Image (cartoon, grey):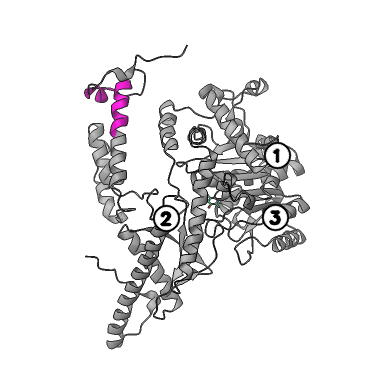
Amino acid sequence: MPISPQNPDTSESPDISATNDALMFDAHALAAYRIQTDQARIAVTAAMSGAQRVHSGIHPHELAPTVNELDIDRPAGDMDAALDELHRLYLDHAVYFHHPRYVAHLNCPVLLSAVAAEGIAAAINSSMDTWDQNAGATLIEQKLIAWTAARAGLGEDADGIFTSGGTQSNLMAMLLAREHYCAAHHGAGWVQRHGLPPEAGKLRIFASDASHFSLCKAAAVLGLGHDAVTAVPVDSAWRMDCEALADAVQASIAAGEIPIAVVATAGSTDFGSIDDINGAARVAQRFGLWFHVDAAYGCGLLVSPTRARLLAGIEHADSITVDYHKSFFQPVACSALVVADGRELGHVTHHADYLNPVEAAAAGTPDQVNKSLQTTRRFDALKLWLSLRTVGATAIGEAFDAGLDLATATYELMLSEPRFELLHAPEMGTLVFRFRPWMTVESAALDTLNDAIRADLARRGEAMIAATRVHGRRYLKFTLLNPATTRDDMAELLELIVTTGESLADSLRRRERSRSRAVQPSDMASQEWPAMQHG
Ligand SMILES: Cc1ncc(COP(=O)(O)O)c(C=O)c1O
């Protein structure tokens, strides 16, 4: 029988001392629950309304003493005191992804519905491993996996599992590729029983030069070594060259290696480039290889009202990484690995008598731990569920599209400023570029200048932009995911980059002059850029 608490909201002004007496969250702590969640909500409200800048600009060494001096063995007192403290340690300095000038990494602002859902998930605290720890949550997760698989065009046999992020999804995909090969050549369960086969050092994975480093990490964790990932060259648009892919697989076989997987990236981290998924699928099929699509970033296209076609070919994947916490505006963590043939997930199944005994599986109990690398696991599917059941998939797709449109508009703005060196036209929402001041600056100093621009904007809390290295040189990067960031915001930011860049370059020139008067040899690359003075 459902428990119906005696209307916890009838106490208009609950006794605040109740919050101190309450320890556990249970049916006796509902008044305290209301007070404490209100206190937390007030803290967040203050932090959000106070976040005029994207970040306070504080440096680690400036904040560290405030944290270090705290004695964890002596509690701050009550929730109010602890939250006050938290403002000083964190909320006053956090990097705010909802801010229009946060244009750095693949972090999105989050849907309100998802924030609310996090409160439910934490309070009920279901664990996703077994039905007897969550009941309905299992069905919700399964339905979202089926929905995602259907959006990707996978067939009836598809299945999958929520994970902690793209890194774990990619790890699991590579694990399945390895197991798929080992099961075919040595029999089911070989690795679980005997460890890696003798030829493990020859197994190879093929992914583009622009693919995510988590694939190399996965290969290392799986005992294949970093070098098992062969980097395939990209074309001028930073997409995997599928002819080079076929040649690389062929050459690998000729060299006595054993290709096991091809990975296409749908939305590379730096360039947002989308590999020719059909072309890569054809190569994988020709050589009988596992075909994985890393759509950690590009998964937003699954719900895009205008650009879903960019994922053409994803339906041929054996496995797909989907990061809802990048492109579906979900709080971290919210990701999934979806596979075309759900039976492949059996490679990670282990039956523990205390948890998910074989008998339970035989009786058809839907224990999700049978498909997961994790055991205890958060109900991360809930936030996506509440978002899809409130705002719906189309609104999410439109919000994702807004970032892509903004990247094009920003690119066009940048074309009219000769001091921006642009590396590519945007395919998704990222732009890699660097600033070149009017004065001539040698390459190494240009690297330092661009790093200095980024650091200066972050220090002042004016903007968070990212940096990366391309062909050995430093570049700046915008990642545009926030539908609240406008073309005007970007125009202002571009202006800020130009003025900051020229000003830093000017300081350098002045310093160079005074050095040369002192007949000092100059090595611009090794110099620190002078800090800008801000009144
Ligand atoms: C293409 C791609 N794959 C995988 C990942 C890893 O995802 P996560 O950070 O969620 O582990 C990233 C992260 O940026 C990514 O861009």
Check residue 486 in the rendering and tell me which mark sits there, or answer none: 2
Is 248 drawn above or below residue 417 in the view shown? Answer: above
Type of amino acid at the residue the image marks with label 3? Ala
Residue 24 forms part of the magenta stretch = yes
Write the residue at 61% across / 47% down: 222
Is label 1 within 8 A of ligand 1 (CB to nearest ligand atom)?
Answer: no
Residue that protrudes farthest toward the top in the picture:
1
* Along the viewing direction, whichever of 394 and 166 lies nearer the viewer: 394
Disc nearer the start of the sequence (1/2): 1
Whether residue 234 can be seen here: yes
For the residue labelled by badge 1, is the local secondary structure a helix, a strand or a loop?
helix
Is 458 drawn above or below residue 70 in the view shown? Answer: below
Tell me: 4 left or right of 235.
Answer: left
Question: Answer yes or no: do the residues labelled 2 and 3 have beta carbons within 8 Å?
Answer: no
What range of the chain is rendered magenta? 15-39
For the residue labelled by badge 3, is the local secondary structure a helix, a strand or a loop?
helix
Residue 17's image quarter? top left
Type of amino acid at the residue the image marks with label 1? Trp
Q: Which residue is mark 3?
A: 280
Type of amino acid at the residue the image marks with label 2? Thr
Of badges 3 and 1, nearer the viewer stands 3
* Along the viewing direction, whichever of 73 and 138 lies nearer the viewer: 138
